[in-house]
């Protein structure tokens, strides 16, 4: 993908956010899905450059459009940039008494549950457990987010690798660290302790 200028990405977010705001409230999901699809490539692009992501998302969070602000804040939390500003933005938008406020509240809850899950994994290994088992059942998190939790936890350890086995109980069963390819420099899953 050609290098996208920050201003072009900001404009795409503002334009798509305005459409998503409108379509969320009027139910025109076909148009909303097209607007969301336009953000896929720029989002993947800035995800790889935290400095650029912070520059873009900071500007987008200044929008007057609550959906646009919420969209940027939620993405910033997902890629772990501008955490405090993003939480404050989502808390403000969550005060709305409509679907946009509800979506912001869900994004906050998701972030809080991911952070809590990562903390539990770290605490387990600090207690010298060889296997740490946590549950994300009944938290609003789903099976697919277990990989994100393991990746974030691994980033807290040397070489981005978990020091032991992790098992996450999900709505669809148990996912272990051996089942997940962690986003590390080696892209190798950790080995179980002997």
Image: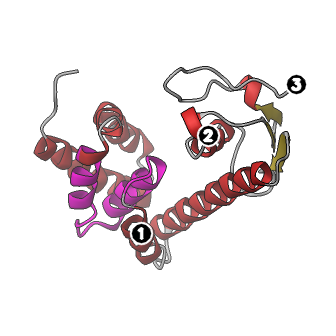
Q: Mark 2 or mark 1, which has the lower sequence index?
A: 1
Disc 1 packing (10 Å; few <14; some 14–19; many ≥20): few
Q: Is residue 137 left or right of residue 106?
A: right
Q: Nearer the viewer, mark 3 or mark 2?
A: 3
Camera-side mark, 2 or 1: 2
- Nearer to us of marks 3 and 1 is 3
Magenta stretch containing residue 72, yes or no?
yes
Q: CA distance from mark 3 to mark 1?
A: 40 Å
Sequence order check, earlier mark of 3 and 1: 1
In the foreground, 191 or 78: 191
Residue at figure coordinates x 73%, y 50% from the top left: 121
| Residue for point 66% across, 52% down | 118
User: Magenta segment, which residues?
Assistant: 52-81
Left or right: 127 as drawn, with respect to 99: right
Q: Earlier in the sequence, mark 3 or mark 2?
A: 2
Is 172 covered by the magenta stretch? no
In the picture shown, does residue 102 fall above or below 80?
A: below
From the image, which quarter does the C terminus lie in?
A: top right
Residue 134, percent from left and from top: 82, 49
Quadrant of residue 65 within the rendered picture:
bottom left
Counting other residues with Cα less than 10 Å from the Cα at mark 2, is it few (<14), some (14-19), or many (20 or more)?
many
Which quadrant would residue 148 be assigned to in this image?
A: top right
Pointer 3 residue: 194
Gap between marks 3 and 2, in whole Å? Answer: 19 Å
Main structural element of the magenta stretch: helix, strand or loop? Answer: helix
**Position of 55 relative to 33 (above/below):** below
Which type of secondary structure does the marked residue at label 3 adopt? loop
The tag on residue 154 is 2
Residue for badge 1: 84
Its colouring scheme is secondary structure
């Amino acid at each position: 993908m050609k290098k996208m200028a920050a201003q072009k990405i900001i404009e795409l977010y503002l334009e798509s956010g305005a459409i998503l705001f409108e379509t969320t409230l009027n139910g025109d999901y076909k148009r909303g899905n097209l607007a969301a699809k336009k953000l896929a490539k720029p989002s993947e692009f800035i995800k790889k450059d935290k400095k650029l992501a912070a520059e873009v998302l900071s500007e987008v969070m200044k929008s007057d459009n609550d959906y646009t602000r919420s969209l940027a804040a939620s993405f910033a939390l997902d890629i772990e940039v501008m955490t405090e500003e993003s939480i404050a933005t989502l808390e403000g938008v969550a005060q709305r008494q409509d679907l946009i406020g509800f979506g912001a509240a869900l994004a906050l809850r998701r972030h809080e549950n991911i952070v809590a899950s990562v903390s539990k994994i770290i605490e387990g290994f600090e207690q010298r457990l060889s296997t740490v088992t946590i549950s994300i059942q009944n938290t609003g998190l789903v099976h697919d987010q277990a990989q994100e939790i393991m990746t974030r936890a691994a980033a807290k350890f040397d070489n981005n690798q978990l020091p032991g086995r992790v098992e996450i109980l999900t709505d669809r069963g148990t996912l272990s660290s051996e089942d997940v390819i962690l986003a590390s420099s080696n892209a190798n899953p950790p080995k179980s302790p002997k």
